[in-house]
Image (tube, helix red, strand yellow):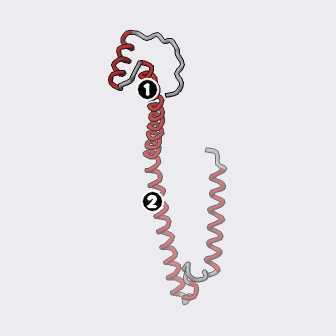
Amino acid sequence: MADMIQRSFYLNEDDLKYLDKLKSQKKCRNRSEVLALLIDEHKNENDITIKNLYEFMAEKVAEKLIPHLTSVKHGTNKTNSNTQVIIELLNGIYYQNSLKDHVIDSEIKPHGAVTNSRNIVKERVLKQAYIKQNRID
């Protein structure tokens, strides 16, 4: 135990009885040890309370965000699915028009039209992101 400093405190009779009860329960030698124990417990309880508050806040934020994130995920999956369908349709057109050497695939060199389309889409996405960032809600 750290160096003790003597101080005088005024307590009512019920508080003294409570300290004596805790003294016997906690097997402390005197009331000063009981007070020190209570203070330590209180310090730790405040730390636990703050941790509980953080956990509670995290749970509430997650409750609000998860439905939105789920809808974003579904939208992204739908967009990806639609994109794959469009690529397959273009592949079919290329194949039907005897352009087998230019079928869209990540493993072969893309046709010039595909490269141009990718650049246009990339620029459009960047422009939309810029507009969205600078918009005042």
Tag 1: amino acid: Leu
Mark 1 vs 2: CB contact within 8 A: no
- Category of crowding for the residue at label 1, using alpha-carbon neighbours closer than 10 angstroms: few (below 14), some (14–19), many (at least 20): some
Looking at the rendering, in which quadrant would you find the C terminus? Answer: top right
Query: Can you give x and y, in whole percent of width and height, for residue 26 in the image?
Result: 35, 26
Pointer 1: what residue? 37
Q: What residue is rendered at 49% in x and 65% in y?
A: 79
Secondary structure category for the residue under label 1 = helix
| Location of residue 44 with respect to 81 vertically, above or below | above
Query: Can you give x and y, in whole percent of width and height, for residue 114 in the image?
Result: 61, 77
- Category of crowding for the residue at label 2, using alpha-carbon neighbours closer than 10 angstroms: few (below 14), some (14–19), many (at least 20): few
Q: Earlier in the sequence, mark 1 or mark 2?
A: 1
Depth order, front residue of 64/121: 64
Measured in 3D between alpha carbons, the distance from the residue under mark 1 to the one under mark 2, in whole angstroms, is 54 Å
- Where residue 11 sits, quadrant-wise, is top left
Of the residues tagged 1 and 2, which is closer to the observer? 1
Tag 2: amino acid: His
The tag on residue 74 is 2
- Where residue 42 sits, quadrant-wise, is top left
| Location of residue 63 with respect to 20 vertically, above or below | below
Answer left or right for 104 relative to 126.
left
| Location of residue 36 with respect to 80 vertically, above or below | above
- Where residue 12 sits, quadrant-wise, is top left
